[in-house]
Image (cartoon, helix red, strand yellow):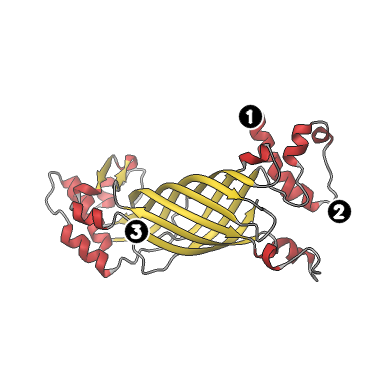
Amino acid sequence: MKRLLSILIFSIFYQFVLSQTTSKPKGSYYIAPGILKSKFLRNLIIPDSNTQATVLGVTFQYLHCPQNNSLRSEGTHVNLILNVARFFTRKFILGFCFDIKGFGGFTKQNFSQKFIGDFNQNYISNYNSSTDSAMANTLKGAINSESGFGNRGNYRIQYGIAISPFPQKYGGLLLLLKAGTNAYSLYGTYTKKLFYNDAGNYMSFNLNQSYSIELTFKPYKFFNSEGVSWSNEKLKHIYRYIVLSLYFERLSLKGATLGGTSYGREMPISQMVNQNFISKYNNIYNFGFEVGFALY
């Protein structure tokens, strides 16, 4: 397993660093003798001149969704791609992807008046313990932007599949289909007093059923050809890795929770609001766009 992991890490480093920095003429690459001796490594690591489908890929992008959407995603995130098909062919990408947004950022949720009204109408105000009451009030205060309460930042962890029939042609279209968890940071009067140990001053509102679709393309492959001359070769080298994406996500309040193991308590949303609210917002749709860099 360690040997295979080393091969995968080296392959992406070779294809995007060593092969690009060589001073040899275009189309020729320095190839380590150890790779030349192995047919498997030659086929796995050395890129094809037409398709160049890589074993490992990565996208680093900034996502923007309309600000008036409730529970929207926003900020920078990373997609890691393992192209399983590369073990059999160089022609396309078909494999697995892992999407992580580990830095919450500073994005605030702008809950719509309709969302706020529906929440308040279905809010459960009576609880058996002060802890449950404090947690529910933190959610209520953050959604209503009450004094001393608020929200800032969002996180995401998703897994899925990656598909690109022509990685280096026709815009290099890459389709990512993912499912996982979205989380939103809330804070309020009670968070530090009741829940602050190593968890921080924020509580986590977790949507455990989130699905997203990303369609990524390379403008360089749409609007430029190898025959076009560039006055600045460095700009050309950077431009070829710029990508744009269309983003769509479906979020669900079904199974959502507040808190988590770091707080010693995880409270289901079904204990904070009536089922009518959960059913109404079982499907929350967000559209957005992304810009960033990609290696695939």
Count residues near mark 3 (Cα–Cα under 10 Å), then give few for <14, some for 14-19, many for 20+: some
Q: Which residue is mark 2?
A: 23
Q: Is residue 223 above or below residue 125?
A: below
Residue kind at label 2, given as amino acid type: Ser
Q: Which residue is mark 3?
A: 284
227 sits to left or right of 54: right
What separation in Å lies between label 2 and label 1 (alpha carbons)?
32 Å
* Frontmost residue, 245 versus 198: 245
- Direction right: furthest residue: 25
Spot occupied by residue 100 in the image (x, y as percentages of width and height)? 49, 49
Question: Hey, which quadrant is residue 151 in on the image?
Answer: bottom left
Out of 229 and 143, give the one closest to the viewer.
229
Q: Which label lies toward us, 1 or 3?
A: 3
Q: Earlier in the sequence, mark 2 or mark 1?
A: 1
User: What residue does disc 1 label?
Assistant: 2
Mark positioned earlier in the residue sequence (3 or 2):
2
Residue 88, position as x, y percentages in the image: 68, 37
